[in-house]
């Protein structure tokens, strides 16, 4: 159903772009109803406006709380144009139709995000009339266009200038966007209020949590071909996160591609110096630092060339032509970097299936006050049967000053540097990991085994297969050593220094074993389980 727009109602909290919109509508001969500050702003700029109170014949009251909550407004929005009974009813009461509604809501989300926001401030910024009008207009989308975002102004005006009306498809799309906006608004209110405690503080986990995510794309299939899947992002994604990636080339990402890519990207962006991370099945199989991308890649790849086959490769520096040439010799599923030089893109131009993701890190603030500013998730979520497990994200960053030397022998400065590197890598490996490192490079990674003994043996086998020696290496474990046999196996493999959380009832036994074997051991006081 196509009908000309004759009357619009404009009521916005955020006035950006509203004068230009008002002028454009007025130029098309559309009558404009408006409220309060919006009406004054439009009138001050020469746009003819009818105050809502003049339109309804009922004054604003209760500090503006009652102005659009009136049958003249909602009758004009809700009346179905295709039902003669509806049109006769509003005509009998002198109610004219409203064909276009432009509303943005009181800034509840922005208000509660401010430090020192009081409950009174929060409550005052819960919009009532706005959501009611939006719902009315969106429900009657066949007759009414509803605009809830300034980003929609230009396209709506362009269509009205061309056709004098909005198409069914446009009105429906606007209605969907409107209901999504109301859903997000109500969810934000629920999140905030259900987190409030009797003493006025806010709980980390609210009484009701309302996840809001926007679909980025449908995926070919889920983890396995018999499963379906889609990829969503947060409403307000953190800077430098995977969802902000721009795919430069390659096939569509799969569910597993995304999971593995995220594991690689979160690991590589945690390093301050040029680094390369190679991931297979969500576990790092090679991590290394270098003076540039080429050196970092060469060293990371050497850790485990077998597992790196068909893996995910991430860099925390722009990828140049020399590094791209080296990477191109291997089979790679996904390649990620903050940027790609023209030379690097040219190298992969003939490899059309390689997925290249550009993820700028410019907006990431390592010293940011919140995880979001630092490009990190605030929370981690895991689905269980008919429920969710939600926890604060593991954003702990270990500093050298946090380390406690527990053995008679202290690590050297070089070993301390490698221990911190190994610890950072171990944070991104599945639990009970044993990670051997040396000189800013992984030498062997035993990922997520049932015991540290088996993990260490696997890591040793990986190192041997890669032609790397573990003699003089350092080793990290994400969990404490419950028995000395776990320590003995890594020392037998060649480790001379160990970093682990500590906290076992057998710490004294393990420390004594380290002293007996003549190796250094430091405790972190924190563990990084990844189940």
Image (cartoon, rainbow, N blue to C red):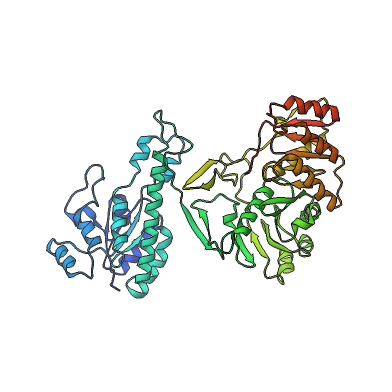
Q: Residue at x 41, y 51 (%)?
A: 184
- Seen from this angle, which residue lies furthest left? 92
In this rendering, the count of numbered labels is 0
Q: Quadrant of residue 527?
A: top right
Q: Residue at x 38, y 61 (%)?
A: 176
Q: Nearer the viewer, residue 148 or 472?
A: 472
Q: Is residue 421 visible?
A: no
Q: Position of residue 83 (x, y in %)?
A: 20, 69
Q: Position of residue 1 (x, y in %)?
A: 29, 73
Q: Is residue 521 visible?
A: yes
Q: Specify whether 20 is left or right of 327.
A: left
Q: Nearer the viewer, residue 404 or 389?
A: 389
Quadrant assignment for the C terminus: top right
77 above or below 499?
Answer: below
Q: Residue at x 60, y 52 (%)?
A: 240
Q: Quadrant of residue 405?
A: top right
442 above or below 137?
Answer: above
Q: Nearer the viewer, residue 491 or 351?
A: 491
Q: Position of residue 441 (x, y in %)?
A: 79, 47
194 above or below 46?
Answer: above
Q: Position of residue 363 (x, y in %)?
A: 60, 50
């Amino acid at each position: 159903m196509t009908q000309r727009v004759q009357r619009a109602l404009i009521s916005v909290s955020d006035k950006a772009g509203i004068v230009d919109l008002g002028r454009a509508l007025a130029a098309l001969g559309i009558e404009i109803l408006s409220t309060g500050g919006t009406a004054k702003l439009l009138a001050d700029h020469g746009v003819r406006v009818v105050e809502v109170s003049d339109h309804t014949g009922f004054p604003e009251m209760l500090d503006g709380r009652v102005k659009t909550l009136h049958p003249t407004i909602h009758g004009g929005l809700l009346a179905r144009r295709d039902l003669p009974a509806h049109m006769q009813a509003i005509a009998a009461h002198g109610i004219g139709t409203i064909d276009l509604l432009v509303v943005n809501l009181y800034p509840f989300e922005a208000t509660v995000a401010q430090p020192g926001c009081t409950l009174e401030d929060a409550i005052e910024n819960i919009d009532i009339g706005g959501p009611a009008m939006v719902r009315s207009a969106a429900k009657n989308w066949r007759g009414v266009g509803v605009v809830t975002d300034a980003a929609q102004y230009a396209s709506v005006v362009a269509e009205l200038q061309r056709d004098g009306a909005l198409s069914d498809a446009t009105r429906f799309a606007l209605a969907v966007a409107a209901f999504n906006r109301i859903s997000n608004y109500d969810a934000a209110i629920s999140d905030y209020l259900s987190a409030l405690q009797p003493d006025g503080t806010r709980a980390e986990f609210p009484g009701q949590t309302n996840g809001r995510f926007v679909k980025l794309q449908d995926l070919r299939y889920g983890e396995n071909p018999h499963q379906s899947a889609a990829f969503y992002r947060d409403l307000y994604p953190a800077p430098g996160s995977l969802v902000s990636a721009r795919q430069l080339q390659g096939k569509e990402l799969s569910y597993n591609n995304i999971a593995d890519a995220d594991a690689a990207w979160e690991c590589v962006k945690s390093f301050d110096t040029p680094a390369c991370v190679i991931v297979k099945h969500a576990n790092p199989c090679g991590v290394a630092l270098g003076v540039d991308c080429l050196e970092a890649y060469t060293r990371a790849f050497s850790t485990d060339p077998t597992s790196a086959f068909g893996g995910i490769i991430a860099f925390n520096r722009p990828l140049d032509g020399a590094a791209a040439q080296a990477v191109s010799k291997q089979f790679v599923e996904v390649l990620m970097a903050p940027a790609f030089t023209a030379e690097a893109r040219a190298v992969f131009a003939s490899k059309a299936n390689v997925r290249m993701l550009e993820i700028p890190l410019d907006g990431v603030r390592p010293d940011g006050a919140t995880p979001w500013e630092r490009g990190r998730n605030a929370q981690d979520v895991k689905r269980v049967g008919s429920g969710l497990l939600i926890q604060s994200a593991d954003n702990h960053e270990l500093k050298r000053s946090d380390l406690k030397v527990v053995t008679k022998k202290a690590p050297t400065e070089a070993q301390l540097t490698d221990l911190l590197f190994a610890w950072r890598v171990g944070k991104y490996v599945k639990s009970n990991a044993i990670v051997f490192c040396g000189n800013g490079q992984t030498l062997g990674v035993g990922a997520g085994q049932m015991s540290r003994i088996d993990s260490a043996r696997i890591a040793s086998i990986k190192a041997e297969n890669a032609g790397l020696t573990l003699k003089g290496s350092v080793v990290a474990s994400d969990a404490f050593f419950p028995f000395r046999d776990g320590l003995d196996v890594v020392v037998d493999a060649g480790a001379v220094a160990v970093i682990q959380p500590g906290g076992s009832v057998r710490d004294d036994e393990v420390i004594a074993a380290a002293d007996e074997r003549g190796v250094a051991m430091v405790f972190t006081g924190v563990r990084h389980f990844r189940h």
